[in-house]
Image (cartoon, rainbow, N blue to C red):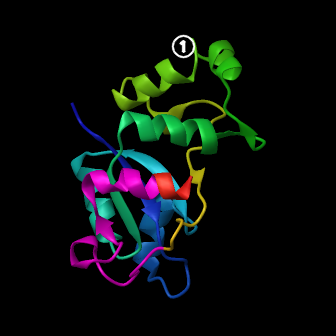
Amino acid sequence: MQTLYAAVRVKGKIGVRREIRLTLDLLRLTRANHCILIQANDTNKGMLQKVKDYLTWGEINKETLNKLVRERGRLMGDKPITDDWVKTHMPFQGIDPWVEAIANERVKYKELPDVKPVFRLHPPRKGWGHTKRSFKEGGVLGYRGKEINKLIERMI
């Protein structure tokens, strides 16, 4: 079973090289503070590694995913995702079982009808920190593992 990554764009679009910009567009990370859910396969890991100087990513847990979908998940027309909408449009009894299916990769979030694949987040409380250093060097860029959950909590 593969894991599910959450990727958050840290830097904006000024001065970005063309091939990096194209990769970010393929990931649907067109603006700073946008977040996506992505499966951890070799292709996606290569794309994330290519744009590691512009975003941060890590494994998202079920609790953070549930909170992210409930508070920042949107439908077309900028409407929030509700339990009633999930009950009428999907074979789930609410958001919690639906998020469980997303976390277990039985359902792909980006392939659902009328659901926007990007979460628009606030800038993190207490700021980003060093946006020119990798996470291992005390900055915020690149792979951060389970620490992505703390960052997303600060941004919701």
| Placement of 64 over or under 103, stated as above or below | below
Question: Residue 106's image quarter?
Answer: top left
Q: In which quadrant of the rendered view does residue 113 lie? A: top right
Q: Nearer the viewer, residue 129 or 133?
A: 129
Residue 133 in the image: x percent, y percent? 31, 82
Q: Residues within 10 Å of mark 1 (few under 14, many from 20)?
A: some
Residue 18 within the magenta-colored segment of the rendering: no
Q: Is residue 152 above or below residue 41?
A: below
Q: Quadrant of the N terminus?
A: top left
Does any portion of residue 27 appear in the rendered image? no
- The answer to whether residue 78 shows anywhere in this view is yes
Which residue of the protein is positioned furthest toward the right in this rendering? 77
For label 1, the residue is 92
- Circle count: 1
| Left or right for 132, reference 115 | left
Q: Quadrant of residue 14?
A: bottom right
Q: Is residue 50 left or right of residue 77?
A: left
Magenta part of the chain = 128-152
Give whichever of 83, 37 is nearer the camera.
83
In the rendered view, does 117 fall on the left or right side of 103?
A: right
Percent of width and height locating residue 26: 47, 58
Residue 70 at what x, y percent from top left?
59, 35
Q: Residue at x 57, y 11 (%)?
A: 93
x, y percentage for residue 56?
37, 64
Left or right of residue 49, residue 54 in this image: right
As shown in the figure, which amino acid type bears the numbered disc 1? Phe
- Which residue is rendered at x = 54% and y = 77% of the image? 12
Of residues 111 and 101, the one drawn nearer to the viewer in this rendering? 101
Q: Does 9 sit above or below residue 106?
A: below
Determine the residue positioned at 32% across, 77% down.
139
Circle 1: element type: loop
Residue furthest to the front: 126
